[in-house]
Image (cartoon, rainbow, N blue to C red):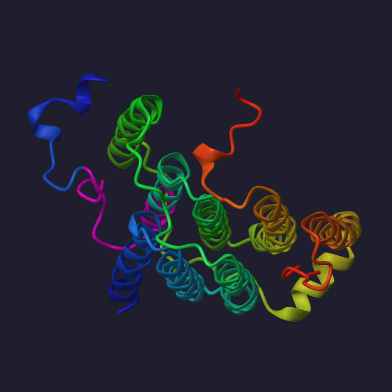
């Protein structure tokens, strides 16, 4: 049953991800991005990472995708991409990258087999909130401090950027959607 | 490289690279899915020319790496991958906030988000 769900949601996630790349309309691409994040969250549930799945939905689907959609609506971008033909160098690099990725995936699937134990026999890591808190405040205390500092810098930077942009455009009344 | 091209190793679904895998879902399935999502995001970054969509594809790649880290964590039975993903999500949220603020500032200055029109450093 878990296998069936894996294949179903893997298919849906890849479909939504392809929709992000293929859609010419930026709003549709944003909705596809949201769906793809939800698919990844379901796959995290299948991997017994319930807390991270909730975090994925809250932060990625709830904040990031909505922020993207908000900015798209703010710009009123019509039609998404311009219709100019692709540059030659982009086409060449795309084909080269496709060849490399295909070779990599093929050789990985045929020869790079990693030992994959049966999920029922591996005890799931206790990824509940209590263990997260314990780990974050003992083993990973320094990264937590650094990340907190990073968030502070990001908040200050966003405030400064949006303020400057508003002043240069001559309409200080409107603030873009900055998030702390 | 020869073994890739011999007839007995050819699979009709070789591009999806599922042909050589066992039927039961394991670590390799999750890693392949993650690689596929990463590749899709990568092509979006290469091919799209709307700055916002390029940025969305970057987020897609980050999301793929999250999936790989959690899969490794689950199949190893340790919690370190989960903690790493916790930090990845935090940094990604900060990155999106700053990146979108930069894009908004750029749009107010140049009135476009198309990549081929943002070539002031090239000329």
Q: Is residue B25 left or right of residue A177?
A: left
Total marks in image? 0
Residue A97 lies in quadrant: top left
Toward the left, the furthest residue is: B7
Could you say where residue A43 lies in the image, as x and y percent from the top left?
45, 70
Rendered residue at 90%/55% (across/down):
A142
Quarter of the picture holding the C terminus of chain A: bottom right
- Between residues B98 and B107, which one lies in front from this camera angle? B107
Asked if the magenta segment contains residue B26, the reply would be yes
Decide: is B27 above or below A70.
above
Where is residue A169? Give x, y as percent: 77, 57
Q: Determine whether A91 is above or below A150 in the image.
A: above
Describe residue B22's horizontal placement relative to residue B99 as left or right: left
Please give the name of the residue rendered at 35% of the width and 71% of the height, measured from the top-left corner.
Answer: A9
Locate the N terminus of chain A by quadrant. bottom left
Where residue B26 appears, as percent x and y from the top left, is 38, 59
Residue B59 figure quarter: bottom right
Assess whether residue B50 is covered by the magenta stretch.
Answer: no
Magenta region, residue range: B15-35
| Residue shown at the point (76%, 72%) measured from the top left | A132
Front-lying residue, A22 or A8: A22
The answer to whether residue A139 of the structure is visible from this angle is no
């Amino acid at each position: 049953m878990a296998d069936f769900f894996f294949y179903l949601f893997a298919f849906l996630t890849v479909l939504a991800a392809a929709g992000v790349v293929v859609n010419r309309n930026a709003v549709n691409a944003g909705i596809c991005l949201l769906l793809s994040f939800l698919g990844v969250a379901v796959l995290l549930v299948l991997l017994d990472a319930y807390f991270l799945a909730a975090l994925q939905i809250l932060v990625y689907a709830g904040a990031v995708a909505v922020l993207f959609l908000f900015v798209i609506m703010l710009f009123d971008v019509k039609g998404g991409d311009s219709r100019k033909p692709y540059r030659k160098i982009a086409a060449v690099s795309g084909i080269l990258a496709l060849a490399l990725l295909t070779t990599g995936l093929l050789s990985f699937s045929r020869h790079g087999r990693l030992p994959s134990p049966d999920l029922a026999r591996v005890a799931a890591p206790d990824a509940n909130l209590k263990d997260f808190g314990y780990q974050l405040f003992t083993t990973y205390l320094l990264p937590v401090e650094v990340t907190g500092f990073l968030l502070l810098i990001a908040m200050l930077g966003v405030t400064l950027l949006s303020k400057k942009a508003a002043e240069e455009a001559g309409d200080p009344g409107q603030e873009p959607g900055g998030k702390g | 490289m020869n073994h890739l091209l011999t007839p007995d190793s050819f699979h009709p679904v070789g591009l999806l690279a599922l042909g050589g895998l066992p039927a039961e879902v394991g670590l390799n399935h999750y890693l392949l899915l993650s690689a596929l999502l990463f590749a899709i995001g990568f092509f979006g970054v290469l091919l799209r020319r709307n700055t916002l969509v390029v940025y969305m594809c970057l987020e897609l790649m980050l999301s793929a790496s999250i999936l790989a880290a959690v899969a490794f964590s689950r199949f190893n039975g340790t919690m370190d991958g989960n903690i790493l993903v916790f930090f990845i999500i935090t940094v990604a949220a900060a990155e999106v906030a700053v990146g979108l603020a930069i894009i908004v500032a750029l749009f107010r200055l140049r009135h476009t988000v198309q990549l081929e029109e943002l070539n002031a450093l090239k000329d």
